[in-house]
Amino acid sequence: MGKLVIDNISSLNLVKEEIQLTLDEATKLLDSFVQGQKDKSLLEDTLKLFSQVHGVLSLIGLKGAIILIGEIEYLLREILENELDKTPVEKRIFAIGNGMINLSHYMEYVQVKDRSVPLLLMNPINEMRKVTKRVPLPESSFVQLDYKLDCELEAIEMEFPETPSDINDVRKKSRRFRHMYQVGMLGVFTDNQVKLHLKLMERALTGVLKLCGRTNIAKLWWTSKGLIQSMSESDMPINDARKLLLGKIDRELKQLVYGRKESIDAEVSQSLIKHIMCIVGLSASDARLIKQLKDTFKIHFSFNEEQLVEELKVMNGPDGSVILTVTNAITEELTQVKDQLDLVARGVSVVQSYSDISRVMVKITQTLVMLGLIDAANVLRNQAEIVDALSDEEKVLEVEEYSKIADAILFVENGLFELQRVSKVSNPLDLEQENKDISLSQLEEARHMVVLESRTGLSVAKRAISSYVDSHCDDIHLNNLPGSLITIAGGLNFLHLSRVAKVIKQCSHYIGHQLIGASERPEVYSLETLADALSSVDYYLESMETNKPIGDGVLEVAEESIAELGLGELEVGA
């Protein structure tokens, strides 16, 4: 049974206040270090404090928090062991501060919810690892799986063909599918039409799965296909750990294409399957393949991805981002400081203790350091010292003095605004993709209609080919296709999509000259290759409907399919 790791947190209540006081002291030391710049003794004292916290968390057994505090210690040691002027210290201080803030939020969550879910800390942990260019931790680091890979493929409800007899034929045909997978993966990595590119990757894995038949390696393609479906069906964010996993699958495809003969029969990496199935287990989709995989590997988590997102919002605030929550809190504090000083400047009210305002400003500077806004922290700290000095002079704040403080606060607010903007763009919990229609001219409307009609025609063509196969190659299902495809190609030429139109015309030629009236039934693989070409073109046109072109890589896949059918160099007339 697979399950998310849930810690025993009954002892946290006894030590949480002490941990928080230690973290506050560490924050002050880091702030002092930023002011002094070169004083490493401050970092050494900070490291000792974190070591104390690490020890306490280890006694409790709070796994996610233990890993997080370990990453903080790692970054501190890195700063201590390197030359300060040659190391990007500010990025590391920001990462440390972000880790501390997340740790505080997490302990609050554990107390309020009376449960611990270490997976909630995966993103902040990996953000810290990214600073030092270390490999991100996968979801499987926070999940327990009890499974066996030796399940019989025959027991799985899939239409596997027999084991292939010619390994060289499998290698040759797998090359096109690997390229198809890579084109899709590149689009996913660049956040370009992610769902369309995931479709392309799934199609590639389906093709490889059929080629490999009942072999050990087929288990990998089967679970990988479920992974891609899970990401697409559940709108999962593709974080660094998941990108790394997709890359590992590509390397397995490379091994299939270029590897030894044994590669198709070799045992599949249990670690890789575990990483894949952890993500499949988080999917809320009820798709047949995903349910089948969960049942086969006995994975039924208490949370799915969508619920984890909601728990993160509970932990970090309504927007699901600890950065946004903290910056909003600082902005409110700055507003209160401005209001108090404004009353003083206008003579409406005299502050009884400037030191109270100064203490609030100093506290804000410490948080700014944690957010990596070092310059803003220094500017505000200077003004805090000026405000604190006013308390001993018993005078009303002069307009000129107020203006300097206001300028400092404005500088801080601008820094916070920029940080908020970046956080909103990169927030991994923001699962909604913007896909808003734009106002189109009449020419653009005509373009849209041609693309829409072309896609409708391609859908009809793919259904006709499917019916042709189901009817044991009855030509009646194909007779109208060559003419229909030539019409589609003509419309695409009108839009100056000559490359797309050429693929369509070549498909028309293949159907008219190789399928209709053929004396022998065509190979199933050839028909699937034809379908790959049409589907690739369809993906390309689908991306044009939303004015977000998928890129020429998918056209390369279509052209490879055409070449595999023997039409690569064929010039066909309109």
Image: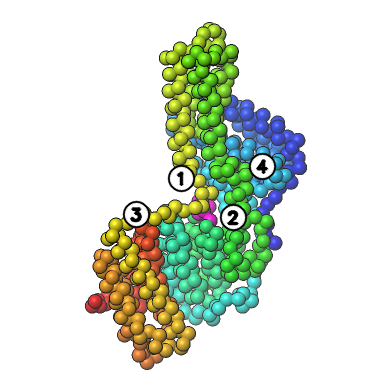
Q: Which mark is residue 188?
A: none
Q: Residues within 10 Å of mark 3 (few under 14, many from 20)?
A: few
Q: Quadrant of residue 100?
A: top right
Q: CA distance from mark 4 to mark 3?
A: 45 Å
Q: CA distance from mark 2 to mark 3?
A: 35 Å
Considering only order in the chain, which callout, 3 or 2, is on the residue closer to the N terminus? 2
Callout 4 secondary element: helix
Q: Residue furthest bottom?
A: 519
Circle 2: residue type:
Glu
Is residue 441 depicted above or below 62 in this figure? below
- Is residue 95 among the parts visible in the rendering? yes
Callout 3 secondary element: loop
Give the quadrant of the C terminus. bottom left
Q: Quadrant of residue 400?
A: top left
Considering only order in the chain, which callout, 3 or 1, is on the residue closer to the N terminus? 1
Q: Which residues are magenta?
A: 236-242
Q: Residues within 10 Å of mark 4 (few under 14, many from 20)?
A: some
Considering only order in the chain, which callout, 1 or 4, is on the residue closer to the N terminus? 4
Q: Which mark is residue 109?
A: 4
Q: Are marks 2 and 4 in contact (CB under 8 Å)?
A: no
Callout 1 secondary element: helix
Image coordinates for residue 11, horizontal then vertical, percent: 76, 40
Number of on-image labels? 4
| Residue shown at the point (55%, 35%) measured from the top left | 326
Q: Which mark is residue 439?
A: 3
Residue designated by label 2: 305
Residue designated by label 1: 425
